[in-house]
Amino acid sequence: MTEEKPAQIEEISDAAAAEPTIAEVLPDIITMVEHVANIGSAVGRRPLGSGNCNDIPDISHCNVHRLKHELKDILANPPPYCCVSIKALDLTHWVAIINGPIETVYEGGHFRLDINFPSAYPFKPPMIRFVTRVYHCNVDKYGAICMDLLRDRWSPIITVSKVLLSIYLLMGDCNPDDPLDSYVAEMYKTNRLEHDRVARYWTEHFAKPEAKKEDDE
């Protein structure tokens, strides 16, 4: 018997689409950052973590130095569960690929995230969404993520690496009591077998582009 496909499945772009790596673009980014820093030198400088920058007229000065610091940190200590790249050499626009946690319905999948940093970062959280379709009660159909760390519990001391780790952990341990997709949350609570079947199907068809290409041939 042919397995019935879940309804309303939409095709997305290849989750593993080629993006420049940090190692490839870091020299250009550092040059750009230094240029911006020189322009803002008349405003005044403070080391990262030395205090609040609210008294600095152009808060993007803090934004640039913080992002430069985080890029260097990720390059020196790459997380084992994901990789990060820069979108079109834009320091405020990153792309991340998170590997599906092992022994979960997302295992083997590669889930693409779009990360945009507001001008007030790190005093306001980055805007992060899933580009790859994922069947998860804390992610809506637009890829928005329901996570306190990106809302009420945000703090300037939180880094992108910590946020990505939290998203990775959320994938393996969802919170159906605070869902963005109430239908998926209800299925998770009342029919776990069907929930897991659909989630594995989505992982196979949306987060494993190589397997999907073979199916289309």
Image: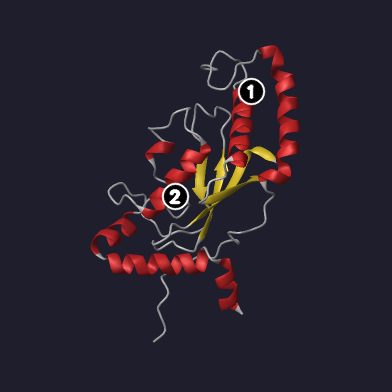
For mark 2, what is the residue?
168
Q: Where 118 falls versus 94 (above or below)? A: above
| Mark linked to residue 152 | none
Three-letter residue code for mark 1: His
**Label 1: few (<14), some or many (≥20) within 10 Å?**
many
The answer to whether the residues at label 2 and label 1 have Cβ atoms under 8 Å apart is no
The residue depicted at 56 percent of the width and 62 percent of the height is 12
- Residue projecting furthest to the front: 76
The residue depicted at 50 percent of the width and 34 percent of the height is 159
Q: Where's residue 59, x and y in %?
A: 59, 21
Q: Quadrant of residue 93?
A: top right
2 or 1: mark nearer the eye: 2
The residue depicted at 32 percent of the width and 49 percent of the height is 175
Q: Where 133 falls versus 167 (above or below)? A: below
Distance from Cα at disc 2 to Cα at disc 1: 30 Å
For mark 1, what is the residue?
61
The residue depicted at 74 percent of the width and 20 percent of the height is 38
Q: Where's residue 11, x and y in %?
A: 54, 65
- Residue projecting furthest to the bottom: 1
**Label 2: few (<14), some or many (≥20) within 10 Å?**
some
Quick check: can you spot residue 6? yes
